[in-house]
Amino acid sequence: MCSTRTLLPIIFFYYFYVHQKNIIGPKIKEARKNARLSQMELAARMQVLGIGIDRSAIAKVETGKRPISDIEIVAISEILNTQIALLFEDSKQWIIRESNKQ
């Protein structure tokens, strides 16, 4: 696992130059599909927890077009029964791969 110190410069580069708003969207989508939940079902379960998010916001998170808060990450990991660290797994490699596309 990478330390924050090594990931931070990459995250800033990615955010400002590649215009992604989060780096865990694809992992959230993968975990959601593995849990066999639709975006609508995930949004509904988050709303039950008091987090105001709708299906389109989930779609934007999964495609990296919307930032995601720490509270939302915790809720998603609980709903999808996955560890938060797994959502960030391979983040550094994903960022490097995506930035090389530019």
Image: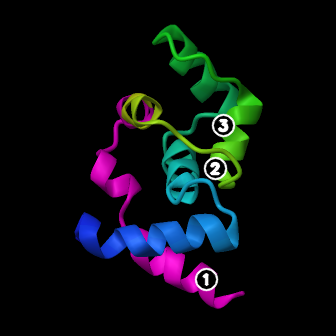
What residue is shown with label 3? 58
Q: Residue at horizontal 60%, vertical 16%?
A: 52
Three-letter amino acid code at the position of disc 1: Ser
Depth-wise, is mark 3 or mark 1 nearer the camera?
1
* Observer able to see residue 100: yes
In magenta segment, residue 92: yes
Quadrant in the picture for the C terminus = bottom right
Going by the numbered disc 3, the residue's amino acid type is: Ile
Q: Position of residue 27 (x, y in %)?
A: 50, 56
* Dot label at residue 62: 2
Q: Earlier in the sequence, mark 1 or mark 2?
A: 2
The answer to whether the residues at label 3 and label 2 have Cβ atoms under 8 Å apart is: yes
Quarter of the image for residue 57 reads top right
Looking at the rendering, the stretch of residues picked out in magenta corresponds to 76-102
Relative to 7, 51 lies left or right: right
The residue closer to the viewer here, 86 or 96, is 96
* Left or right of 100, for residue 71: left
Q: Is residue 99 left or right of residue 1?
A: right
Work out whether residue 90 can be spotted: no
Q: Majority secondary structure of the magenta segment?
A: helix
- What's the residue at 40%, 53% (across, down)? 87
Return the disc, 3 or 1, that comes first in the chain's sequence: 3
Query: Going 45% across and 34% down the picture, which residue do you hit?
Result: 76
